[in-house]
Image (cartoon, rainbow, N blue to C red):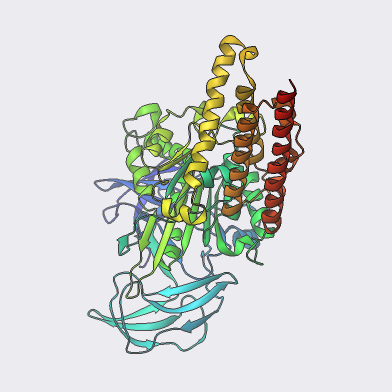
Amino acid sequence: MTETTIGTLSRIAGSFVTAKGMLNAKMFELVKVGEVGIIGEIIRISGNTSIIQAYEETEGIKLGEKIIGTGKPLSVELGPGLMGQILDGIQRPLPLIADKIGPWIEKGIEVPAIDRNKKWQFQPIISKGAKVTSGDILGVVQETPSIENRIMVPPEIVGVVESICSEGDFTVTEPIAEIKTSNGIKEVLMMQTWPVRQARPYKTMLHIDTPLITGQRIIDSFFPVAKGGIIAVTGGFGTGKTVLLQTIAVWIDADIIVYIGCGERGNEMADVLERFTHLKRTDSDHPLLSRSVLIANTSNMPILAREASIYSGITIAEYYRDMGYNVAIMADSTSRWAEALREISGRLEEMPGEEGYPAYLSSRLAEYYSRAGSIKTLGTKDREGSITVLSAISPPGGDFSEPVTRNTLQLAKVFWALDFNLAHRRHYPAVNWFMSYSEYTSFLEDWFLRVDRDWQKLCGDARALLREEEELKEIVALIGADILGDKQRGVFELAKMLKEYFLMQSAYHPVDVYCPIQKTFKMLRTLLKFNEKISTAIDSGVPLQKILALPVKVGISRMKIVPSNEFDSVNAKLTADMDEQFEVLIQEAREEKNND
């Protein structure tokens, strides 16, 4: 659509400007404000007056300057070239801006999200005369060494391929096919645009039955995540939300990562970029950035662009989902996004809801999370894709009853409650095993049974041990530790081992940073077997002090840093040594009893 003047600026109030003479304006239309062309969005229309939300600083613009309408809503460009990009909240590529004008973003600068001059090698997979429908794949482009971009028929196009280019190099703006539809010939480019506030269509929503493995033992065993699920990571400042999300982003079992730094500190996004640029997954020789899109809208950037960054990220995720990929989107944090909503609402003088948040906070959260899920894509051939949403929430003072956390928990199926006390003790990840939960456990039962037939029992026994320790703590606090027998002291020791040797991981140790699911359950089985052996030995009269002095305890403490390819042999020897050492203790206790 052509850009035209649709009004003039009549009032400026920070990032909100009022324009008059806006008879041809449309709600949520993208506009350019003033001579410098500050990017904004119409958020209210009253007669011929409109209120525009500017995504940049408005300093320097003057009353009477023109408002240019683009005729389209806020949209993102989708096509080859997104992978490895670092974008701002309205999809401007930050590295290209830095190369063009330096480290500071000038007002009104326009740089396409996708390079218009770069040529991509297109390989057609269908031929002229083929009947196609929305979502069908016309050809492929190797976007990065690890990601193949599948060029799809845009939504709402159905017809017959009139022509298609043979294998060759093309830019994203060159037609690669023509489709004859009932409304005439439609050209198809490798690039398409899509409004960020509108969910992309799909065929059907699928039942969730496959986990998304994170490599974090407490998560994969106690609080598992499903592909297509919604996860809330909640904790006060300093509890490790960002470190946890960054670590999961590196190791999670997803094809593509979309990481949104929404209002976080700039140094944290710099850490993400540093890790993603240099780190490689164990199953690939390619940098993590080659399968990732980073959206940086840090705390020193305009606050109103935070609201757009969430929608930009989920729309990019939907694009790759429609190709048949499993996408994980990390939003750090939705609390900052909600703060942007609160500021917008306040500037519009809307009636505030709880704690000043707008009354529609819950509906906006529901609108965002509804775009997660595991789906069957559009197209003649069935493909399956998923979007898993992991959202960090930073409640002030760690108050989980505040509106953002409470409304999110009504929608999320997994809740990881990060505990300040655990974080203070350097326990990572600081996931509280009493407050956290996962509602996907029953859906994932069949999958986990193929990994370990006793997985439910193992997890149940481990959590029961932790609960028993908590109950004994209350008794000790009331009466004192002197009343405890060896069995009760053994519970404390085993719970301590479970926390330190299993639940605690290192985000920096080259082996312990990621734990395969098979190793996770084998470690848990070994720890619980040690617990059974302790109970049997104490019943046989073995003092707890002798049990805790066994050499096998050192081997158990080192299980988590044993490389996966060596773990089975080390664990087998550990189990054999455990049986032998306990047998010796029990035999000695029996002999002492007989001698007495």
Name the residue at 48% across, 31% down.
Answer: 435
Q: Measuring from the top left, give residue 375's x and y in whole percent.
A: 36, 61
Say left or right for 500 vs 124.
Answer: right
Name the residue at 60% across, 60% down.
Answer: 97
User: 102 above or below 462?
Assistant: below
Residue in the foreground of this view, choosing between 497 and 272: 497
User: 305 above or below 131?
Assistant: above
Q: Measuring from the top left, give residue 404's x and y in whole percent.
A: 42, 35
Q: Residue furthest top?
A: 479
Residue 319 lies in quadrant: bottom left
Quarter of the C terminus within the rendering? top right
Q: Measuring from the top left, give residue 100's x and y in whole percent.
A: 63, 63
Q: Measuring from the top left, give residue 477's x and y in whole percent.
A: 58, 13
Residue in the foreground of this view, choosing between 329 and 334: 329
Quarter of the N terminus within the rendering? bottom left
Residue 491 lies in quadrant: top right
Total number of numbered labels?
0
Residue in the foreground of this view, choosing between 404 and 176: 404
Q: Is residue 264 visible?
A: no
Q: Is residue 348 visible?
A: yes
User: 363 above or below 163?
Assistant: above
